[in-house]
Amino acid sequence: MVMEKTVFHIKEKSGVVIIRVTEKKLYQDVVTPFQNTMVSVLERGRKNIIVDLSEVDVMNSSGLGVLILVWDRLSRENGKLVITGLRRLMKELFQRMRLDLVFTLAENEEEALAFIRGDKKIPAK
């Protein structure tokens, strides 16, 4: 039996699934359990997801690919994906790759929940 590494905490708040990645590096053996979890959340019909990357220092293209997969699916289903807690280097990565223009980025969970509820607009930075 193969056990997948636990690399995240999942909770639900006001109908929104909040996934906090607990690894500093989102690549290699961490990406597969992350992708499996994200796909499982989507398959359960969840349409509003917050991904908290506040503990992540570095992510490779595979990790970004998972986020793009989720964003694409939610966009087609009128759902929302909000990414929170980007540290300085991760923010720079998103900006250099122009992903800050694709993803909705929030400073924290409260701001992300307000955006999903429609209480707050998050401007592109």
Image: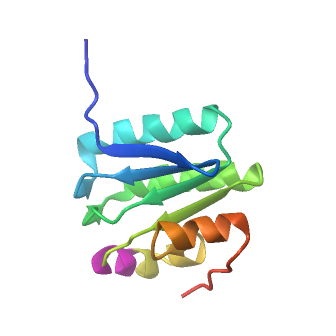
Percent position (x, y) of residue 100? 52, 77
Q: Is residue 75 left or right of residue 40?
A: right
How many circles with numbers are drawn on the protein?
0
Whether residue 88 is visible to the viewer of this picture, yes or no, is yes
Query: Residue at (53%, 46%) from the top-left corner?
Result: 12
The residue stretch that appears in magenta: 88-93
Side (left or right) of 123 relative to 97:
right
Residue 121 shown in magenta = no
Measured from the top left, where is residue 25 in percent x and y?
23, 56
Instruction: Give how far across and how far down residue 95 sits, in percent.
Output: 45, 81
Front residue of this view, candidates 58 and 97: 58
Q: What is the quadrant of the C terminus in the image?
A: bottom right
Specify whether residue 92 is painted magenta. Answer: yes
Say which residue appears at 68% left-offset and 51% top-offset. Answer: 74
- Farthest front residue in view: 14
* Residue 46 sits in quarter: top right
What colouring does the structure picture have? rainbow
Residue pictured at 31% horizontal, 75% vertical: 87
Asked if one can make out residue 104 in the rendered structure from this viewpoint, the answer is no
Q: Pick the quarter of the image with the N terminus.
A: top left
In the image, residue 86 above or below residue 47: below
Residue 58 lies, with reference to residue 13, above or below; the image says below
Q: Position of residue 9 (x, y in %)?
A: 36, 45
